[in-house]
Amino acid sequence: MGVEMGDVPTRKPKAWHGFVCLVLLLGQPQAVSASDWFDWYGITGPCDGDCAFMIFGGKFVETPMDEVFFQGNLSPSEWNFGDSGLLGIAASRRVASLLDNKFQIEAELGLAKRFGAMDEYETWAAAYLRYVSFPWNDYLYTTVAVSTGINYASGIADFEKEKSDNGDGSRLLHYFAPEITFAAPEDKSKELVIRFHHRSGIFGLVNDTGGGVQYLTVGLRFGF
């Protein structure tokens, strides 16, 4: 006796069918791998071009940072400069990259000496996030970076005491130092660095201190 098509029993999928399909799916090449969006280089071992040393110097800026960056006073010709200078050195290392190397993360340690109207030392530890993928980089290699970290001064300048709510200031403050760099595309190991070296209490968040000492600086960074 023949079996009608409508009488053919339907086969229910087994549980292991789904497991096999999942394994096969995960085994296929993915469009984006983990290293495309985050790649950790580490902080030990040979540098292989990830390390750098910078020397820099600059002039004290009395104009508050919020006026410089958020109220349109971007031209240094519109800033008020004080009677203090700064000379410093910094060592850094690239420790990771993000989004297929469009962004880089760096660790930095630095030491600087004020002179002129102020004479304190500063030291800092910071992490930098750097954008390195400008469309004109084949002609002029350009990067921009911002930092977050801590800055410790050997003394408290009168300028910072005046900016603090308690009139005392703080030796330990936040370190925020945005920068832009330029280099020849054929030799990125030598960079011209323009940095706004800034320490502050983040609007009173750190020890009731407002704006801190800051300098417009220019330096040279050498990678190795």
Image (cartoon, helix red, strand yellow):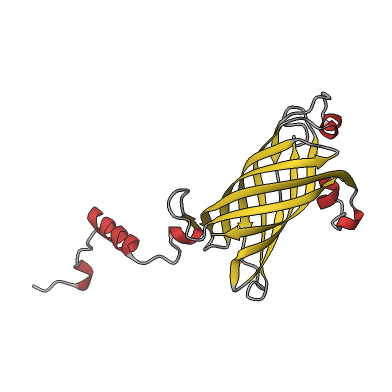
Return the residue nearer the eye: 129 or 29.
Answer: 129
Left or right for 10, reference 174: left
Return the residue nearer the eye: 2 or 183.
Answer: 183
Residue furthest out toward the left:
1
Q: Residue at coordinates 75% horizontally, 44% vertically from top-left?
A: 198
Q: Is residue 138 above or below residue 118?
A: below
Task: Point out residue 161 in the picture as x, y percentages from the top left corner.
Answer: 83, 29
Residue furthest out toward the bottom:
139
Task: Point out residue 212 in the picture as x, y percentages from the top left corner.
Answer: 79, 37
Q: Is residue 166 above or below residue 36?
A: above
Task: Point out residue 195 in the picture as x, y percentages from the top left corner.
Answer: 73, 53
Return the residue nearer the eye: 205 or 88.
Answer: 88
Q: Residue at coordinates 59% horizontally, 49% vertically from top-left?
A: 91
| Image mark count | 0
Task: Point out residue 177 in the picture as x, y percentages from the top left corner.
Answer: 71, 48
Q: Residue at coordinates 79% horizontally, 47% vertically from top-left?
A: 215
